[in-house]
Image (spheres, rainbow, N blue to C red):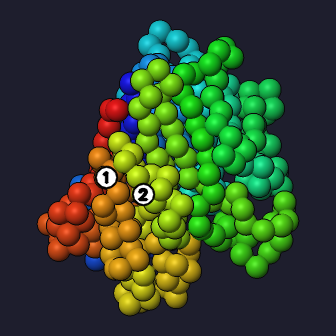
Amino acid sequence: MLRIVVLGAAAGGGVPQWNCGCPVCRTARSEQPNIARTQASIAVSRDGAHWYLVNASPDLRQQLIATPQLHPKSGQLRHSPIAGVILTNGEIDAITGLLSMREGSPYTLYAHARVLDILKANSIFNVLSDKNVKRLPIEIERAFEPTLPDGSPSGIEVQAFPVPGKGAWYLEGKAHPTGGDAAGDTLGLRIADKASGKYFFFLAACARVTDDLKTRIKGAPLVFFDGTVWRDDELVVAGLGQKTGQGMGHIAMSGKDGAIESLAGLDIARKVFLHINNSNPVLFDGSDERRHAEHAGWQVPSDGTEITL
Ligand SMILES: [Zn+2]
């Protein structure tokens, strides 16, 4: 059995974002606090005792407080059920939560070499000592089994694959510590319970759905997918910024090449949006966009949603 908890469903900045007065952020601060969401991350467990985070958002501390499954075991002075963190990219909203996990509890950090190089190049991450936090490279298309704190196998199999995306925006126009092209900057994950064979996909960042990707995820029991914007020019039209969804490496939900249309007919049992930007009207309960998404079989999760496979 796999247990998955959505720790946060929002894109970078969260809902509401500190400096944003858009309709969604304003409403989240006032009449509908239930539409507030923290920045995207999930936790996965097979046994309910040991958990792996997929990405560590800047809201991690708040997310851990809100998630009883991730509290220290009662009776223990120092303990965390978090056995590891798997990073799918080097964006600020995926890595800065690591700085809230610096108090000496051991865990393993899994990331592509390009993301590990970003961490290595930023001395602030040296606060995670090699002794407590082992950093292991993820190789593309090579499945691995994260270990439990005592070194034994977790029974969970993770396979990473590259998806169309963009490198971290703070490195835009600058040299990447690894150099070379962007392969490995944005990963999708297939996470499986080895015993039951149950599996799901994590694709919280994806710029477009290729035929290869369709083949890969066809028939999956569960897919978490990039829900950053409803329409590609949403931020521009709302006067919030100059970047399109594509310009940020994110597919739109709507439109001919959008996520809803692209994943229709792939026989995916459960489709859940993640990494939803605060500009996205799908966050409003009862909006036309929400109805459209739900009618097409998509879920817009609240923080804390638990899914069992
Ligand atoms: Zn906003």
CA distance separating discs 1 and 2:
15 Å
Q: Residue 46 lies in what quarter of the image?
A: top left
Foreground residue among 148 and 94: 148
Residue 87 drawn at (x, y percent)? 62, 47
Residue under the point 48% across and 77% down: 245
* Residue 22 visible, this angle: no
* Residue 208 image offset from top left, x and y in percent: 50, 70
- Relative to 246, 22 lies left or right: left
Q: Residue placed at 56% from the left, 80% from the top?
A: 247
Question: Residue 237, how many percent across, how many down?
Answer: 38, 90
In front of the other: 120 or 29: 120
User: Does 211 sit above or below residue 141?
Assistant: below
Category of crowding for the residue at label 1, using alpha-carbon neighbours closer than 10 angstroms: few (below 14), some (14–19), many (at least 20): few
- Above or below 97: residue 67: above
Q: Nearer the viewer, residue 218 or 260?
A: 218
Instruction: Name the secondary structure under disc 1.
Output: loop
Q: Is residue 55 left or right of residue 297?
A: right
Q: Residues within 10 Å of mark 2 (few under 14, many from 20)?
A: many
Q: Nearer the viewer, mark 1 or mark 2?
A: 1
Residue 218 visible at all: yes
Q: Would you name the residue on which mark 2 appears?
A: 225
For label 1, the residue is 267
Q: Amino acid at mark 1?
A: Asp
| Cβ of mark 2 under 8 A from ligand 1 | no
Q: Amino acid at mark 2?
A: Phe
Vertical relation: 138 (above or below) 230: above
